[in-house]
Amino acid sequence: MAEGSAPVKARGIFIRTLREASEMRAGVDLQKKVWGYGDIDTVPEQMFIVASESGGQVLAAFHEKEPVGFALAFAGFHDGSPYLHSHMVAVTPEYQDRGVGRMLKLAQREDALARRFNLIEWTFDPLQLKNAHFNLVRLGAIARRYIPNFYGRTSSPLHAGLPTDRLVVEWWIQSARVQNLLNGSSPVLHAEYWRISIPAAIRRICASDPAQAEQIQSGVRKQFERHLADGCAAVGFELNQQHGSYLLEPYED
């Protein structure tokens, strides 16, 4: 958050910036609690300190004195323009679906606006359908890049041994699109758009049949690579009992 601003508060939960080295351990512990990471895949507390001291963000959500989520971002440049790369946002299982993740993202945006950033980026697994809806519909982000096996295969049970394919999210935090969607509007699509659909049961498939899940992932990868190469962006998402569907359309800056 901006220096001197009041913490974001809702339903007994508040968010504040972590500044002291002694506080950063919370981010390490939460990674293991949320994702089941082994030590080799866990971002150490020293990197939280580096992010804090080099223009990034280290935010944590608390219920009373208990940390229940965090956001970690690093400062970066694209073609000479500064942006924030949101490396991790995590919420403990018992506090998920309570709006904590949205609070963390809005706190990231508030801090970024105060420091005159226009763009926050992050990556997410295209097979995480709730995340897709949250990123593209609730926050108003778009995706124009797909990176196969971005982190390599990890020890996290959430990855089910699959390649860590990732969509790169662009959150243009001052844009009319973002402001409208944060105010509750729905995405408006062009007349011409395409769908990339994934079974709604994909998480169950990942757990029960990783080979089938990897086939689905491979098909999704090929579709994204084709449409993105043609100048499209993922700008919307629909979810029903059968499928989650990315909505892509031609996109220009």
Image: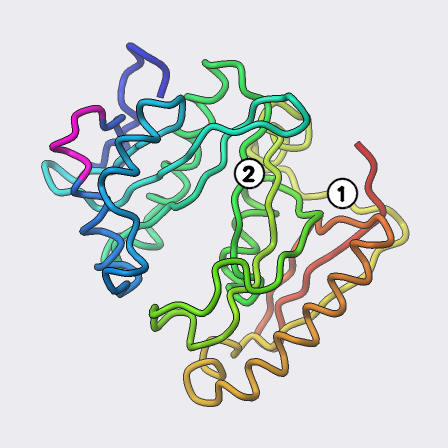
Q: Amino acid at mark 1?
A: Val
Mark 1 or 2, nearer chain start: 2
Q: Quadrant of the N terminus?
A: top left
Residue closer to the observer: 226 or 101: 226
Q: Quadrant of the C terminus?
A: top right
Q: Nearer the viewer, mark 1 or mark 2?
A: 2
Q: Position of residue 26 (x, y in %)?
A: 17, 43
Q: Which residue is mark 1?
A: 188
Identify whether 130 is placed above or below 104: below
Q: Is residue 200 left or right of residue 16?
A: right
Labels 1 and 2 touching (C-beta < 8 A) = no
Q: Is residue 89 left or right of residue 252?
A: left
When asked about the image quadrant of residue 238, the answer is: bottom right
Residue closer to the observer: 54 or 166: 54
Q: Position of residue 76 (x, y in %)?
A: 52, 29
Q: Amino acid at mark 2?
A: Glu
Q: Is residue 163 left or right of residue 49?
A: right
Residue closer to the observer: 75 or 160: 75
Q: Which residue is mark 2?
A: 121
Q: What is the total number of numbered labels drawn onto the structure image?
A: 2
Query: Mark 1 falls on what kind of element?
Result: loop
Query: Mark 2 falls on what kind of element?
Result: strand
Instruction: State the scheme by which the image is colored.
Output: rainbow
Mark number, residue 24? none
Identify whether 241 is placed above or below 118: below
> Magenta segment: does it hold 27?
no
Name the residue: 70% across, 43% down.
187
Residue closer to the observer: 131 or 85: 85
Name the residue: 41% across, 82% down.
207
**Mark 2 burial class by Cα count in 10 Å: few <14, some 14-19, many 20+:** many
Identify whether 109 is placed above or below 211: above
Q: Which residues are magenta?
A: 19-24
